[in-house]
């Protein structure tokens, strides 16, 4: 019985490590269940649980960003970006967030330039153009 329990614990630990490496939500969920039943240490279970929650949040944030990027208004996009940031996601980790952030900046500056052109007041556009050039170079 002890050998079987040790073998089960070893298998559960290996599966959990593999699931954490591949970041597959379903596999991680199943591995987490096995880990809990096998009696893996609490720290490993907590780590896997946090990763599972993060994977679920990635899907939610990506869907939110996708929907917001289709909307021509800036506000939904800003809210989606804020949600991503408040859940500790950064642009360097998520292509969709990177794209959404760039799109939000472009929309903002397009509105600013359009407003300046409409009132025929172009003072200060020099700063805007140099700022935009820095973004493009990035």
Image (tube, helix red, strand yellow):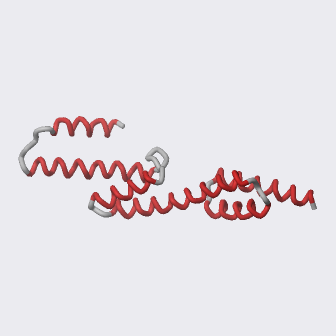
Residue 67: name its quadrant: bottom left
Name which quarter of the figure residue 35 lies in: bottom right
Which percent across, then down, holds residue 16? Answer: 71, 55
Q: Where is residue 90 in the image (x, y as percent from the top left)?
A: 45, 47
* Count of marks, rendered view: 0
Q: Residue furthest front?
A: 42
Residue 114: x and y, percent? 15, 51
Q: Is residue 95 left or right of residue 122?
A: right
Figure check: 104 above or below 71: above
Name the image quarter holding the C terminus. top left
**Among the 4 quarters of the image, the one containing residue 64:** bottom left
Residue at horizontal 76%, vertical 56%?
40
| 67 lies left or right of 115 | right
Seen at 71% across and 51% down, the residue is 17
Determine whether, in the image, residue 118 is placed left or right of residue 132.
Answer: left
- Please tell me whether residue 13 is drawn above or below residue 129 in the rendered image: below
Q: Which of 102 and 74 is in front in this view?
A: 74
Q: Whole-percent x and y of residue 1? A: 93, 62
Question: Is residue 95 depicted above or below 122 in this figure?
Answer: below
User: Residue placed at 17% from the left, 47% from the top?
Assistant: 113
Of the pair 67 and 57, the residue shown nearer to us = 57
């Amino acid at each position: 019985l002890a050998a079987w329990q040790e073998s089960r614990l070893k298998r559960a630990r290996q599966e959990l490590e593999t699931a954490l490496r591949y970041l597959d939500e379903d596999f991680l969920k199943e591995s987490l269940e096995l880990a809990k039943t096998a009696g893996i240490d609490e720290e490993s279970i907590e780590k896997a649980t946090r990763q599972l929650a993060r994977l679920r949040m990635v899907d939610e944030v990506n869907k939110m960003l996708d929907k917001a990027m289709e909307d021509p208004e800036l506000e939904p996009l800003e809210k989606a970006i804020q949600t991503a940031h408040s859940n500790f996601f950064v642009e360097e980790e998520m292509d969709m967030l990177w794209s959404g952030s760039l799109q939000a900046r472009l929309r903002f500056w397009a509105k600013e330039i359009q407003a300046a052109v409409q009132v025929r007041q172009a003072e200060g556009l020099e700063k805007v153009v140099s700022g935009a050039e820095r973004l493009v170079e990035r």
